[in-house]
Image (cartoon, rainbow, N blue to C red):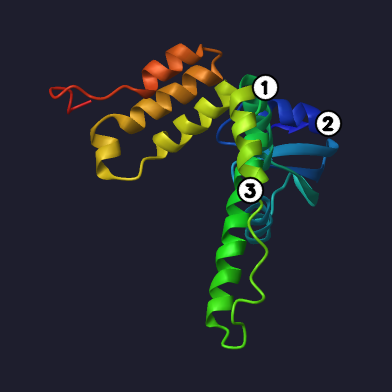
Amino acid sequence: MNTHKTLDAALVIGLTNDKAKSCAKILHRTEGECYINLTIDHESFVSALKRTPSADIKWIIGPAADYRDERRVAAAAALAAAVPGVPEMRALAEKSAAESDRYSTEFAAMMDDEQNDGARPPRPEDRSLAAQISALREANPRAALYLRAERQAVGTSSYSATSGEMKGGQDAKAILLGGGTIEEAEKALAYRYESNDWSN
């Protein structure tokens, strides 16, 4: 069992170990209060100790970190640093989608309401959101391209995978995250398998 006297020391090791899922603060029988990295989540750790007590662990003080959350935060920070504008564009796109859904739902409810003859229509969609999104795209071309690559990397059909479309999106994302140019990313995004590359 590897123990760490501080949480920071445990985090340095845990975040570089893909197998680490969580970190717990414990009272060690000989080392006192310390931290240990776990390959299971905290709840599973507690259950396992109840079934099979450890000679080294006097008791569990509590959870100290969830590396899944820590990695998500670190990945988001790395993305924001490498491709500025992505978080803002995502947030605005989500707001625009929610606004569109709101209007559609309220319009459908109006049509179903026999007492509403259209005199009380739903509040119109906020059209300024589309303009804000366009302005952000113009101001942040790398971010706009990254989000396009992200959509392409997921794919929506069997053609996306077999044609190389998804691979192009994945490669373009990697290029932008690695500091590559927009031109390099656009070239990757346009990539398609040649007819004899079906085995790639």
Q: Earlier in the sequence, mark 3 or mark 1?
A: 1
Instruction: Identify the residue at image location x=60%, y=63%.
Output: 103
- For residue 127, which numbered disc appears in the image? 3
Q: Earlier in the sequence, mark 2 or mark 1?
A: 2
Instruction: Identify the residue at image location x=66%, y=24%.
Output: 84
Q: CA distance from mark 3 to mark 1?
A: 30 Å
**Residue type at tag 2:** Thr
Task: Please tell me in which quadrant of the rendered image residue 105 appears.
Answer: bottom right
Secondary structure beneath label 2: loop
Side of 195 where 171 appears, left or right: right
Kindly identify which residue carries mark 1.
81
Secondary structure beneath label 3: loop
Is residue 157 visible to us here? Answer: yes
Secondary structure beneath label 1: helix
Side of 137 where 11 appears, left or right: right
Kindly identify which residue carries mark 2.
6
Q: Earlier in the sequence, mark 3 or mark 2?
A: 2
- The image position of residue 50, as x and y in percent, is 68, 60
Task: Please tell me in which quadrant of the rendered image residue 141 appears.
Answer: top right
Up the image or down, 27 lies above or below 165; here it is: below
Instruction: Identify the residue at image location x=43%, y=12%.
Output: 184
Q: CA distance from mark 2 to mark 1?
A: 28 Å
- The image position of residue 146, as x and y in percent, is 52, 27
Up the image or down, 174 lies above or below 104; here it is: above
Of labels 3 and 1, the one closer to you? 3
